[in-house]
Image (cartoon, grey):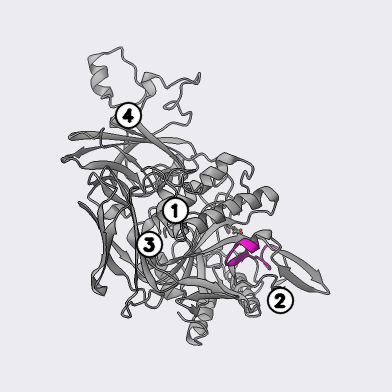
Amino acid sequence: MTGVIITGALSGLFFGLAAFPAGAAGDLPGPDLVLTNSASRDHIDLTGAWTYSIDPYRDGLKSFHGNGPGLGHRRYETTDVEAVTRENPTARYEYDMRREKIVTLPGSWINHAPELRHYDGLMWYAREFDAAPEGDERAFLRFGAANYTAHVWFNGEFVGRHDGGFTPFAFEVTDLLEDGENLLVVGVDAQRTDQTVPPPVTDWETYGGLTRPIRLVYTSETFIDEARTWLGRDGRIMAELALDGPGAAGQAVSVTIESLGLTLDGRTDRNGMWQGSIAAPDTLSLWSPDNPTLYDVTFAAGDDTLPERIGFRTIEVRGTDILLNGEPIYLRGISMHEEELGSDPGRIMTEPAIRALLSEIKDGLNGNFVRLAHYPHSELTTRLADEMGLLVWSEIPVYWLIDWNNDDTLAEARMMLAENMMRDMNRASIIIWSVANETPVGDARNSFLRKLIADVRQRDDTRLVSAALLTESTTDNGTMRSWIDDPLADDLDILAVNTYNGWYGGPDLDGVDDIVWEARHEKPMIFSEFGAGALAGFADEEARRKFSESFQADYYRATLAMSENIPFLKGMSPWILKDFRSPRRQHPVYQQGWNRKGLISETGQRKQAFHVLSDFYREMQTAGTTQD
Ligand code: GCB
């Protein structure tokens, strides 16, 4: 696509701008290809058997003197090593991808072999497959995510590199695709540095590898790269399309919602873009957690059609209220990592695995909200949140200690934000884009995060922006007072704080509900985190020691009591639904490599505190204090 700046009153609304290269559209970066809803396109599913080969010294990328890799190490070549060495006995190869061990992808290498548990280096994956391309079809390799850096070769040619472990990316391979056998080789490097997003130190497992679906996607020569429809706050249904290909300009396009009897149509401009709107009909059923109506929508342009399922709703703030479809709502939530239930997770997020977690939130906890921490979760997760009726906080891993002064780090964060947003623009469930978690206030950090906030607003002014902030507090005459002392609060729509009084400091549990929270901004606040660790089954009713279920339940009682005294608190996503793997948690009895703040254990056993929160949310729901 070529870049252009659209001017005029509506320009800020239109996500199509984001498709243009950095600098072209108000300095808003974004990927060249979005391939929206690629799963519904004609494709070859590359899920399944792959071979893998470990490469801790990265010999496959560089020789030991820093030049290109030697012949014997180029795992990405199409050479049939066994055949060549049979023919030429003096040939020397120190790899043979065809005869390597076989694993099933997607999924982290953590589960391939016990010695890979803490491996954070380079791993090679290879997969052969047959293709039968037709006529003027185009072909793209599309990866749901590769954690952290991916180097991709197709039929022996380098096709591209992608950085960032949680967002999708695609490369066009139309000219390389063979009729018959093809070879895809990917080097995935899980190493993070002080300059990456996230940095090396986090509080979760890295899960290196190809963790989400991989597809060879076919499209027509000119295809719909981006497509979006949503309900504007003015009551109009808005729609946008951006085409890619030689016939992108002046193309007839349409958006049809058959069950509403609606069709919007028109022609793309010279840049292959089109926008339109129409008054929403009275029959429109608004999406909400208790009515998660999704409409079948068909986007069409020339030879291309793209189906979607989309909900329509509005979200905004007024004073200290959050309004869903114009009505105040309290976010009854929980946080969640991307890790399936089980004693040995590998970030294999199948539909049943995701449903199991989300239904614990919706039906078990009586929740209506989930914080998908601390990075973009799979596309399947946000699609299921749409379907099951859960509001979503979507986040990028600008976490703890980021290199705020580094332009490349900022560029990486902005691209990640763009990729995350562009993937999920049609998800009614997503109401909040979050740009950071627990980052210390400072000039460099403030301007870094302001850049991200500006990007969100320029790309999508229909949702809310937040970040999990740190708080200040003092104690006078035994009373603790807490408040947000962060200049970023002025830039955000919802103020979010992580608070751990009674676990990481603060008063004893008895004093927690006396904490006074001061409002220094006329904005809604949510607790984006609070929590305490507990080993499932360790009751300790007498002493109520830390790590007992009883302590965790008391901690929840105390914190929930505190929450009821805060009039501007409009929701919470306590930390966390399920115990999750974290290499920094090594108490030999209580943790064993797991952060134990889950309300359910890693295998799904509900702890006492689960019921405390579930009852609290149920009462809130039945008291009808907020819509559902
Ligand atoms: C936090 C972090 C979260 C940690 C949690 C904890 O504030 O945001 O990533 O896992 O505390 O358990 O300490």
Q: Label 1's element?
A: helix
Rendered location of residue 488, percent (x, y): 65, 59
In front: mark 2 or mark 4?
A: 4
In front: mark 2 or mark 1?
A: 1
Rendered location of residue 10, percent (x, y): 44, 60
Distance between the alpha carbons at the discs numbered 1 and 3: 12 Å
**Disc 3 marks which amino acid?**
Asn
Classify mark 4: residues with Cα within 10 Å, few (<14), some (14-19) or many (20+): some
Image height of 182 relative to 416, above or below: above
Q: Mark 2 and mark 1 in contact? Answer it, CB < 8 Å.
A: no
Q: Label 2's element?
A: helix
Residue 372 circle label: none
Q: Nearer the viewer, residue 412 or 207?
A: 412
Judge left or right: residue 514 versus residue 344. Answer: right
Disc 3 designates what residue? 426
Judge left or right: residue 451 versus residue 515. Answer: left
Image height of 49 relative to 529, above or below: above
Distance between the alpha carbons at the discs numbered 2 and 4: 64 Å
Q: How many numbered marks are there?
A: 4
Mark 2 or mark 1, earlier in chain = 1
Work out which quarter of the rendered image holds the N terminus and state it.
top left
Q: Label 3's element?
A: loop
Q: Label 4's element?
A: strand
Mark 3 or mark 4, earlier in chain = 4
In front: mark 3 or mark 2?
A: 3
Work out which quarter of the rendered image holds the C terminus and state it.
bottom left
Residue 157 circle label: 4
